[in-house]
Image (spheres, rainbow, N blue to C red):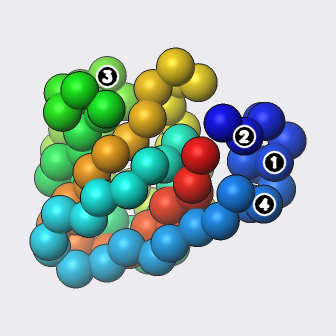
Amino acid sequence: MSSSTEFMAGFTGSRVVSGTSAVTGNWRGFIVNADCVVSAILDEANASLLTSLGLSGVTLRQGAFIVVHEEKIIRSITLTSGSVVMYNI
């Protein structure tokens, strides 16, 4: 696991996600690169995070920063539109 300073500085690595296919990884959060809609986002137990993160039916604007609690991990994200930069754990 990374420290919060390493995560915020991007030292843990990142990946740009766009398109409408599910993408898997081990992420703590993301920054919206281009306005987007998240259609699915799953944690380490394959449970949906849409409601707990308030992302259901929401268009996220460029620059929005979304993170999960330090005890959670984003394992999968699917976009309807736009792109995000996912930050590794």
- Residue for point 85% across, 41% down: 5
Q: Are marks 3 and 1 in contact (CB under 8 Å)?
A: no
Q: Are marks 2 and 1 in contact (CB under 8 Å)?
A: yes
Q: Amino acid at mark 3?
A: Ser
Please determine whether, in this image, residue 54 is positioned above or below residue 58: above
Q: Residues within 10 Å of mark 3 (few under 14, many from 20)?
A: few
Which residue is labeled 4 in the image? 11
Q: Earlier in the sequence, mark 2 or mark 3?
A: 2
In this rendering, position of residue 59 left or right of residue 1: left
Q: Which mark is residue 52?
A: 3
Q: Amino acid at mark 2?
A: Ser
Q: Are marks 4 and 2 in contact (CB under 8 Å)?
A: yes
Q: Quote the CA–CA distance across marks 2 and 3.
A: 23 Å
Q: Amino acid at mark 1?
A: Glu
Q: Quote the CA–CA distance across marks 3 and 1.
A: 25 Å
Q: Earlier in the sequence, mark 4 or mark 2?
A: 2
Q: Are marks 4 and 1 in contact (CB under 8 Å)?
A: yes
Report whether residue 76 is seen: yes
Q: Amino acid at mark 4?
A: Phe
Q: Earlier in the sequence, mark 4 or mark 1?
A: 1
Which residue is labeled 2 in the image? 2
Please determine whether, in this image, residue 77 is positioned above or below residue 41: below
* Residue toward you, 64 or 8: 8
Location of residue 74 by image quarter: top left
